[in-house]
Amino acid sequence: MNLNAFRKELAKPNTSIQLCLIGIIGGVCAASLIILFRLTVDWLQTKFLVETNQYGELDPIIRLVLPIIGALCIIFIAYLTGFKHYRMGIPFVIHRIKHFFGRIPFRTTVNQFLGGAVALASGFSVGREGPSVHLGAFGSSFFGQWLKLPNNSIRILSGCGIAAGISASFNTPFAAVIFVMEVVLREYRIHIFIPVMLAAACGSVMTRAVFGEAQELSFIQFHDFSQWVYLYLIIFGIVLGFVASLFNNFLMFVMQRSNRLNMVYRLIIAGVVTGVIGVILPDSLGAHFHSAHEFIAENDSMKILIAVLCAKFFLTIIAIGLGIPGGVMGPVFVIGMISGAILAAPLGLFVDNSNELQGSFSLLGMAGLMAAVVHAPLAALSAVMELSYSPQLILPAILVIVPAYVTSTQFLGNSSIFIRQLEFQKLPYTLSSVLGELQKTGVLSVMEDNYKLVVDQNDNLVNLLDSSVNTTVVRKSNLEDAVQYSLVGYDQEPDCDTRRITFTEMKGVKSQATLAEVYGILATKRQGAVYIYAGTQDDIIGVISWNKLRDNLHQASF
């Protein structure tokens, strides 16, 4: 199969071997980039840490200076790439997928890779899932753009890259697929689901080959408990719903109040605040699961746990709110872990195995807080279950996630932190149902390629139209500085037997475009046609009329 036939098959919104193949290739590209990113972070940490993520072993003066140096490095990277290319992370990727078919700019990706690596290495309270999503989407969509694949398939490729990126970052293929469908694409379609699954599997296989088989939370054991504790889980979930709303509101408050500040000042402030608090409470630095678990296990003092929880809460809001490149879900997991350990303490008055409850509630806290902050209950459940390799937590997690989510949304009016960030940045993230459906089909799969092409004026147009009743006739006019294509047809005037030949000027659409672009051109007059071109605009390869578009739209299922 040649490349043109390959592109034409990908333009169809159907599951195909071609779509599965690009899902695998996109997954490999994205996973390779994420593995390189993780190795870069580990390499940077080995330059000043005896053991990765163990900031408590550093001298206080180094803990103070390290985030400040990190902020200065991030500023320097942003200066080299251009400050206008600083938008990055999950909200930005959602916007690009909805309105640009997942095409991620190169310079923002450089900022995300280098800036994210520095942020994670220098102790900022940010997660690596933000860079994983951004880099994964770029790694796979770049492949699609290089081959000039249809835009609808590049959009799917971006989803594949995100799934592979999360899977390669956390070794969670199932949670990666759910996250893409629930948070990023926000839809479930079989022809999208299959390649995304294949990409996630590729990411998991590759990261296991490099970093080993162990899960991120395998060191936490989930222990079953008495069924009467289930009633307490509902209260636990309600508390987490309040914590999530508080977190989202404070984060947006910081973003809004600091918006007028120059980005250089914002990043320096984030570095100074992180360094100062890091001197006092070194366990609040970073967002690593194993370090947080060790801290919880080694400290029985409730005051210290609460102090570190408050510090982590504050540092995360400062880092994300002031623009440090990184994700929000990593620190949210750590906050949920510590919150769970604290809220499990009252049960020690009624049960003997309170230490076992601490680990179980840490996992449940992670699931409940993520569901309420991100508004992704299924992704939260699957992520914690897969990270800890504990399927037995499903029922207790549901009893925590549901009240946490309902409390956050229904009673406190909290929205997903990603949606709130998009609205604050004035980045559109929604589409009408018509455009959303038309974006799934490329023009190559619908265009009429057996049209009749005539050059300039032709005396035989009447005979040509009469002999081509079911075939589109297009006239090509060579102007002084351009080529113009017109749709040729009859204009049947009312109460008149004469037929006059009409020429309706057509606009051109790239062969990579989807039917959404065609609809945007023809919807106003609801008549006429567009021509499809490959390469230059005078290289016409097909025609799509309004009638053809309307028929395709009527066949779509919403």
Image (tube, rainbow, N blue to C red):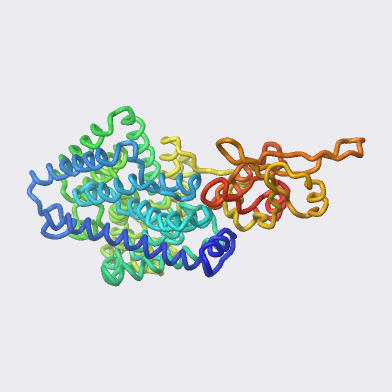
Residue drawn 13% across the image and 52% down it: 56
Q: Is residue 473 visible?
A: yes
| Relative to 127, 383 lies left or right | right
- Which residue lies most toward the front here? 459
| Relative to 409, 443 lies left or right | right
Whether 393 is drawn above or below 435: the answer is: below
Q: Position of residue 383 (x, y in %)?
A: 39, 61
- Which residue lies most toward the top here? 260
| Relative to 50, 79 lies left or right | right
Residue drawn 50% across the image and 47% down it: 98
Which of 482/69 is in front? 482
Q: Which image quadrant for residue 66?
A: top left
Whether 433 is drawn above or below 394: the answer is: above
Q: Position of residue 10 (x, y in %)?
A: 55, 61
Q: Is residue 399 visible?
A: no
Whether 399 is drawn above or below 430: the answer is: below
Which of 439/287 is in front? 439
Which of 110/326 is in front? 110
| Relative to 557, 179 lies left or right | left
Q: Which image quadrant for residue 323?
A: top left
- Total count of labels: 0
Residue drawn 28% across the image and 33% down it: 263
Q: Position of residue 257 (x, y in %)?
A: 33, 29
